[in-house]
Amino acid sequence: MEEKLISFTKEVDAWIEDNCPQSMRTPMPVSEQVWASSSIEFPCNDSRVWFDAMVSKGWCTPEWPVEYGGGGLSFEESKILKSRLKFFGCRPAQINFGISMLGPVILEFGTDDQKKEFLPKISRGEIWWCQGFSEPGAGSDLANLSTTAKLIDGEYIINGSKIWTSEANKADWMYCLVRTAKTEKKQAGISFILINLKQPKIDIKPIKLLSGQSPFCQVFFDDVIASESHRLADENDGWKVAKRLLEFERTMMADMGSEGAVDIEPIETFKTSDALSAPGQLNLLTKIKKHEMRNHLIDLTMTRTQIESKNGFSPAALSLKYISTEETQARWELNVASLGAGGLENVENSSGIKKEIAKSFFYSKAYTIAGGSSEVQLNIISKHILGLPS
């Protein structure tokens, strides 16, 4: 087995050398991200070459079955692939919530027809997915949602609204929680439905943030239609799907580094800034080193969580989202500090590295809210890991 994995590692290295352009082995600014979409766009020819190479191997979804567009790799092979891509500094070939969140729950809860319809398209980056969970009256208390879906002749008629929906104004489809029954226990009347956003009677309004970006939107449904065949799990049993998807989302957020920004490590900023000669530099350098050690521990815990998740729920996943998003915020605060006096500038007035750091600093403030706020995560940890009373 060891020899087989060594051979596979050599195969991956050779394939990367042959297929990943040098320009795709550099940090990726937000302007050069490739989002999965029915109208996918590439900032340059090299990004298209790299995307096509990864898709043709099924390595955007390395552990998915080959018949669903995946690479058919074992867990150990997938782990090697990810580590070698990271070693060579390869950019993600695509950004795709379908891969990191929806795809795994379709594999677990979907019918054969649903798997055949959606998984290959997800792997090939042909659908931009967004998440319709939160509502104006259902944020931390997600089960309080009120968007309704009524089944009539094989179709759901949906009315209501969702908020803080990332990139809804660009998305093709939404995976959505809707209320299909009024029950004493709120969770018992919820269904998980896939909605095609390219239809009338859907109004999507972007929400502008402090960073100047607008990744979040509010979405309004007025007699919107979704097929009964696009419901995951039984009617009124969507809460179990939602909980499982949130596990994948929180694991993704623990491992995403700097979604929405170029990945810049504080130590690199420190080495090239005025802070190197400023008073208190040793104190700042010590903070950076401690941050790097904590990140290494997070990476090790992430690996353990992935192994544990193969056998079901991993309690460590509950704490990872909290720890890693708090640490991500610390990273961008250290990046700002490493720029020295006046390092944080208005995004619209700055340029170059300062602009990327400023954008990422502001954007990072959302990490401890998205996917369940830090306060909610601490409540979950206290209940499900420490066994404390509700």
Image: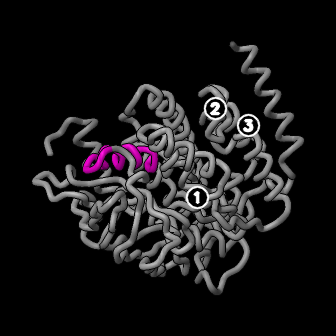
Q: Nearer the viewer, residue 328 or 307?
A: 307
User: Which residue corresponds to the image point at 48% horizontal and 53% vertical from the top-left?
Assistant: 327
Three-letter amino acid code of the residue under disc 1: Ser
Q: Which span is picked out in magenta? A: 234-250
Quadrant of res 265: bottom right
* Residue, disc 3: 84
Spatial CA distance of label 3 from label 2 is 9 Å
> Disc 2 marks which residue?
79
Q: CA distance from mark 3 to mark 1?
A: 19 Å
Depth check, front residue: 49 or 232: 232
- Label disc, if present, on residue 89 of the rendered structure: none
Callout 1 crowding tier (Cα within 10 Å): few <14, some 14–19, many ≥20: many
Q: Amino acid at mark 2?
A: Lys
Q: Residue 371, position in %: x, y?
A: 40, 56
In which quadrant of the rendered image does the N terminus lie?
A: top right
Determine which quarter of the picture holds residue 74.
Answer: top right
The answer to whether residue 248 is magenta is: yes
